[in-house]
Amino acid sequence: MQLIDDRLFLSASDLVAFMECEHLSALDLRATRGIETIEPSRDDAALLVARKGDEHERAYLERLHAENVDVAVVPAVAHGLGDLDEAVERTIQAMRAGADVIYQGALRDGDWRGYADFLERVASPSPAFGDYSYEVLDTKLARTTRPRFVVQLCLYSELLERVQGRPPEWMHVVSGSGERHSFRVDEFSAFYRRLRRRYEVRLAAAFPDTYPQPVTHCELCGYSDHCETRWEG
C-alpha cells in the first residue's frame, strides 16, 4: 500500500501479504499512515532475489526485441496521482494503437492499481478494441508457480477487464527456467474475489486485534525483527 497525495492506494502485494499474514497487513497500514515507525529487517538474500528477478524480466524484454516484437514501453511512475494517471493513459493509448506487447502497463480501478510486467495482444475480440484484447504475463524467478503469483495475475486481469470491457481468458507466467505457464482466469477468480472482499472488510476496520503468529512467510518478511521483539517481550 502507498499514500499518493494523501490517498491510500492498494496493490497485489497487499493482497498477497494479507493471504500470508493478517498481522503483516496491519503493520503495513500503520507504517504507511505514519502511525508507527518500524525499522525494516535487513535481508540481503531478499535483495539479491529481487535483483535477479529484475534481470530475468529485462532478459525477457530483450528476447522480445530480438524477435522483432512490437513492444510499447510505459515509462515508470514517479510520484503523485498525476503521474499514475498519465501512466494509465499511456497504457490505454498503447492498447488502442494495437501494440503486440506492452511493457510495464499501468492499470487502475479506484484505489487499486497494478503494473503488469507485460500485456500481450491476443486475437480475442473486446468491446474496447474490436478484434483483439490483451492478457497479462509476468516474469517470475521461481521455477514453479506459487499461489501468490496467481493472486497477482488475477488482480491485474480484473483491472485489465475494466479497460477492455471483457475478462482475459488466460494469464501467464514465464518462470526462471524460461518456461511459460498459462492459467484460465475463471478457474481462480472466485478464490481471488473472496480474498479481496475479506481484505477490504478488514482494511476498513484497520485490521483490529491482530497478533504476530509465526508463519512460513516470517522468513521473508521485512517486519520479522519487529515481531520477534513482541515474542521475546
Image (spheres, rainbow, N blue to C red):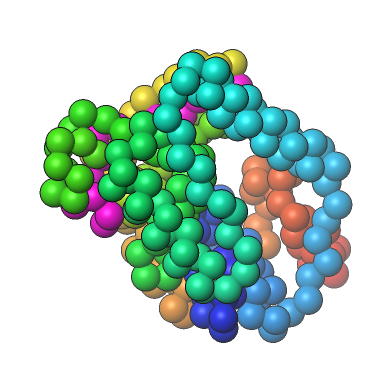
Vertical arrangement, residue 206 with respect to residue 119, above or below:
below
Where residue 200 appears, as percent x and y from the top left, is 40, 69
At x 36%, y 25%, the residue is 182
Vertical arrangement, residue 154 with respect to residue 57, above or below:
below
Q: In the rendered structure, which segment of residues is drawn in magenta? A: 161-176
Instruction: Verify whether residue 141 appears in magenta.
Output: no
Regarding residue 56, the answer to whether it shows in the image is yes
Front-most of residues 133 and 113: 133
Instruction: Verify whether residue 167 appears in magenta.
Output: yes
Vertical arrangement, residue 63 with respect to residue 138, above or below:
above
Q: Is residue 117 left or right of residue 98?
A: right
How many numbered badges does the structure rendering display? 0
Q: Quadrant of residue 30?
A: bottom right
Where residue 170 appears, as percent x and y from the top left, is 29, 32
At x 56%, y 52%, the residue is 75
Regarding residue 228, the answer to whether it shows in the image is no
Where residue 6 appears, as percent x and y from the top left, is 57, 83
At x 53%, y 24%, the residue is 65
Front-most of residues 233 and 39: 39
At x 28%, y 47%, the residue is 96
Q: Dividing the image into 4 quarters, which one contains the C terminus?
A: bottom right
Where residue 146 appears, as percent x and y from the top left, is 51, 33
Q: Is residue 192 left or right of residue 54?
A: left
Q: Dividing the image into 4 quarters, which one contains the N terminus?
A: bottom right
Q: Quadrant of residue 227?
A: bottom right
Front-most of residues 80 and 224: 80
Q: Is residue 5 left or right of residue 196?
A: right
Front-most of residues 33 and 161: 161
